[in-house]
Amino acid sequence: MRKLRVTGPGGAGLAASCLLAASMPGRMRGLLGRTSLARDEGIHLVPCNAIHMWFMKFPIDAVFLDREHRVLRIYHSIQPWRMTPIVRGAHSCLEIAAGRAVEVGLREGDVLRFEEIPQ
């Protein structure tokens, strides 16, 4: 999977190391099997308009974005074995460490920037 750097408004660092999951197997695997997620890590699921937390071992923040990477909805600290409703208009979901969205002051309507990290 390709790696991305994700920044928010004003250049706020959201995820310094974010995996891009743009294939069906990549999206299905997501963060399953991991026991934690570092504060500066994430995964960008494309396309995606809802997620589940079945078999997950830790909570996350889920940030749903439209095609222009505008934040449509943020679900904070989603616990294992939960799921989100379908987010109308969502094209992708950025999964980040629980509490990270609040730490950087992310809000609905903000536009995120995704930059590929050379391998």
Image (cartoon, rainbow, N blue to C red):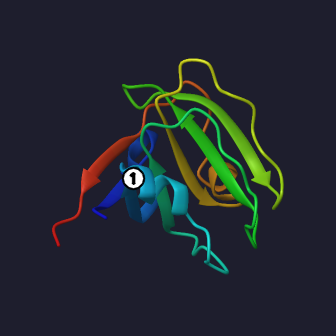
Residue 17 in the image, given as x and y percentages of width and height = 39, 68
Check the image and report above or below for 96 versus 73. below
- Residue at position x 48%, y 58% in the image: 43
| Horizontal side, residue 84 vs residue 66: left or right | right
Residue 12 visible in the current orientation: no
Callout count: 1
Looking at the image, the residue that sits furthest to the top is: 89
Residue 47 visible in the current orientation: yes
Residue 66 in the image, given as x and y percentages of width and height = 46, 25
Q: Which quadrant: the N terminus?
A: bottom left
Q: Which amino acid does label 1 sit on?
A: Val
| Horizontal side, residue 82 vs residue 19: left or right | right
- Residue at position x 61%, y 28% in the image: 108
Binning the other alpha carbons within 10 Å of mark 1 as few (below 14), some (14 to 19) or many (20 upward) gives many
Looking at the image, the residue that sits furthest to the left is: 118
Looking at the image, the residue that sits furthest to the front is: 25
Residue 38 in the image, given as x and y percentages of width and height = 57, 75
Residue 49 in the image, given as x and y percentages of width and height = 57, 32
Dividing the picture into quadrants, the one containing residue 83 is top right
- Residue at position x 61%, y 69% in the image: 32
Residue at disc 1, secondary structure: strand
Q: Which quadrant: the C terminus?
A: bottom left
Between 56 and 102, the one nearer to me in the picture: 56
- Residue at position x 44%, y 58% in the image: 25
| Horizontal side, residue 92 vs residue 79: left or right | left
Check the image and report above or below for 70 versus 8. above
Which residue is labeled 1 in the image?
Answer: 6
Between 36 and 26, the one nearer to me in the picture: 26
Looking at the image, the residue that sits furthest to the bottom is: 35
